[in-house]
Image (cartoon, grey):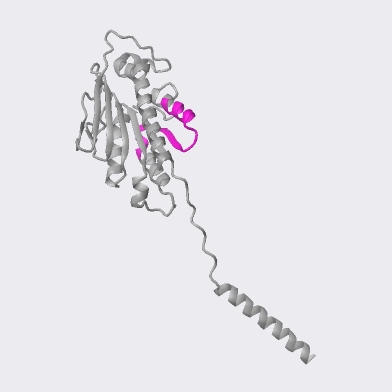
Amino acid sequence: MRGTRISVRLVLLTLSLVSLLKAESPSPATPVEIRATPRAMVIGFVGGFVRHDARAHSTVQVVEHLRNAHREGVYVQSYANRDRSRAYKEIVQRLDGDNDGTLSAEEKQNARIVIFGHSWGASETVTLARQLQREGIPVLLTIQVDSVAKLGQNDSVIPANVSQAVNFYQPHGIVHGRPRIRAADPARTEILGNFRYDYKDKVVRCEGYPWFDNILVKAHTQIECDPQVWSQVESLIYSKLSTENRNTATR
């Protein structure tokens, strides 16, 4: 019996030592998830109180076209103009390739961002670019269509982190776009142009818009659904994405 009790004690002692060693042994480190940074990101802001997915609006249509054309490696999304903070967080999260919660200098410089919008969305385009500038994140291109400044925002001066910027506007009606944008630093930002459109003698049919848009802010609505304007917007973005794809392929 005594020998049996000793054997039991030895077994229990051995088990205790094994448990203790396991508890004190460091667990293997969890590997850091390395995410592929998109070749480019395209952010589109709709104007007014429009939903981010309202398909009648050209910003949403351009986003859908780009998404279908660039199914891999390019992040394309439309946002309501009140959701700039969400767009900013999405950009930062996607740039954070090692998922450590902090953007390195290399991760920032790897940014390939295009931002565009109509009306208040165009104002948010410039404001988002300025917010990215404060974090040292470059922007390839900003596009403003009939830009209307929101309270407390400056949509006329393009920050120096933007490589190129372009402005489309029409001058008529109680709501009309800013006629001119300029670079905060002309040595770093190229203004591609301030292009005026006039709808006094031009008829553009805008399907799917509320009746009051077509009456109260007719010209402002017409430039939003003018296929000639948005064909240029889309071509500018396609050109920028194609250039970036070529640059990426040669690295």
In the orientation shown, which residue stands out farthest toward the right?
1
Specify the farthest residue to the front.
250
Marker count (numbered): 0
Please give the name of the residue rendered at 37% of the width and 28% of the height, measured from the top-left corner: 239
Residue 25 sits above or below residue 67 on the image: below
Q: State whether residue 163 is above or below residue 168.
A: below
**Quadrant containing the N terminus in the rendered view:** bottom right
Depth check: give the residue in front, 250 or 168: 250
- One can see residue 219 in this view: yes
Relative vertical location of residue 167 with respect to residue 82 in this rendering, above or below: above
Q: Quadrant of the C terminus?
A: top left
Image location of residue 36, percent across then percent down: 47, 45
Tell whether position 90 is magenta. Answer: no
Decide if residue 95 is on the left or right side of residue 125.
right
Quadrant assignment, res 112: top left
Quadrant assignment, res 24: bottom right
Query: Where are the magenta residues, as a range?
Result: 62-84
Q: Residue at x 34, y 30 (%)?
A: 116
Rendering quarter of residue 206: top left
Q: Is residue 77 magenta?
A: yes
- The x and y percentages for residue 179 are 21, 23
Can you see residue 79?
no
Along the line of sight, which residue is nearer the eye, 80 or 35?
A: 35
Whole-percent x, y for residue 140 in the image: 32, 36
Of 238 and 178, which appears nearest the observer?
Answer: 238
x then y, percent, for residue 5: 75, 88
**Residue shown at the point (34%, 33%) measured from the top left:** 115
Task: Report the residue at 39% width, 33% height from top.
Answer: 241
Name of the residue lying farthest toward the top: 201
